[in-house]
Amino acid sequence: MYSAETVKNTATVIAPLVLTDGAILTDNIDDYPGGIIIPVDKPYRWTSADVIRKIKFAAVRHFGKKNLKVGHAGTLDPLATGVLLVCIGKATKMAETLQSHDKEYVAGITFGATTPSYDLEKDIDRHFPYSHITEESVRKALEGFIGEQDQTAPLFSAKSVDGIRAYEIARKLLKTEGPGSLDETAAALVRTSRIKINTLELLSFDPGKSDSAPDDADRLESRQQRALLIPSEKPSPKSSRINVTGHTVLPLPRATIRISCSKGTYVRALARDLGEALGSGAFLHSLQRSKSGDFDVRDSLTVENVLAILRQRP
């Protein structure tokens, strides 16, 4: 579990309280001059903003302070889970510092196809050969991504392009010109970022179902259409607008990879680049932020845990 010592060196004067399960808070925010940091395990299909709205509403009621500041240190995609650091009060001043720390992710990557969003939010737009992809070839390709490198973020991202969110441009292009224009537009409009991959570990590899014809695009597209008829997990009311396609049932090769990287790294873009390095395509079918700095998902609280603490009275 975490204590104030975990983040003491990042605070300018007074270390914040790091909330743990079962904690009891007073109803006076002034009792926490360094603010409060809550490591939350973000739910699947919730946006980071959803989490902040939910916790801020409860925190405002608990502390009786309408202008209470609540924010987070590092956005997580809606289809990702894992560590989201929620900052309350004076701790919001530390958000940028907390966000600058290295991150660890566990990513599920599917090979042989791509989607415009590089994850399960959008339908497959292209199919690629994949029968040549093996566990050994994936291990070998991963070695080429270790170290510093320039990375182009997905156009479906919160990157700013002349004051406009990149995903707004992506949505318009998808409607007017189709998915084929997205990668080229991203390369032209989105600035590359200098990132660093510290380690890449292949945790598992599944070559896919043996009863499929690996490079037969027609049969694969037929399977894709059947997959889309399978109802996806029922979303919570908070996240019903977040789409999830059914591509996880397709008979494609899949890998699970642990990634340690610098801030600003887009794991969806890494999946895209890994697919290209293997002479194929790829997209994310799952993503968990397992660590953010010293904060581990195993010690993070659920949203329900946090709300229960904020409902308590000392």
Image: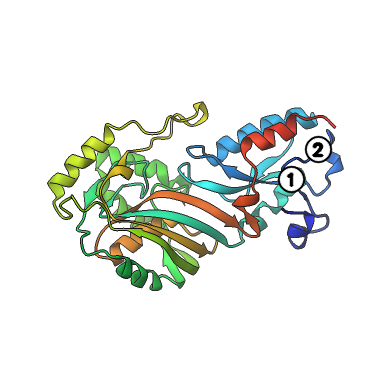
Q: Does residue 4 appear to the left or right of 278 in the view shown?
A: right
Residue under label 1, please give it: 19
Residue 291 at what x, y percent from top left? 58, 56
Q: Within 10 Å of the Cα at label 2, are there few (<14), some (14-19), or many (20+) other Cα atoms?
A: some
Residue under label 2, please give it: 25
Residue 222 at what x, y percent from top left? 17, 40
Could you tell me if residue 285 is visible in this image? Answer: yes
Q: Secondary structure at mark 2?
A: loop
Q: Within 10 Å of the Cα at label 1, are there few (<14), some (14-19), or many (20+) other Cα atoms?
A: many
Q: Nearer the viewer, residue 71 or 189?
A: 71
Q: Nearer the viewer, residue 290 or 162?
A: 290
Residue at 26% across, 63% down = 133
Which quarter of the rendering shows the C terminus?
top right
Marker count (numbered): 2
Task: State whether residue 232 is above or below residue 81.
Answer: above
Q: Which quadrant of the view contains residue 302?
A: top right
Could you tell me if residue 159 is visible in this image? Answer: no
The residues tagged by marks 2 and 1 sit, at their Cα atoms, a distance apart of: 9 Å
- Mark 2 or mark 1, earlier in chain: 1
* Amino acid carrying mark 2 in the image: Leu
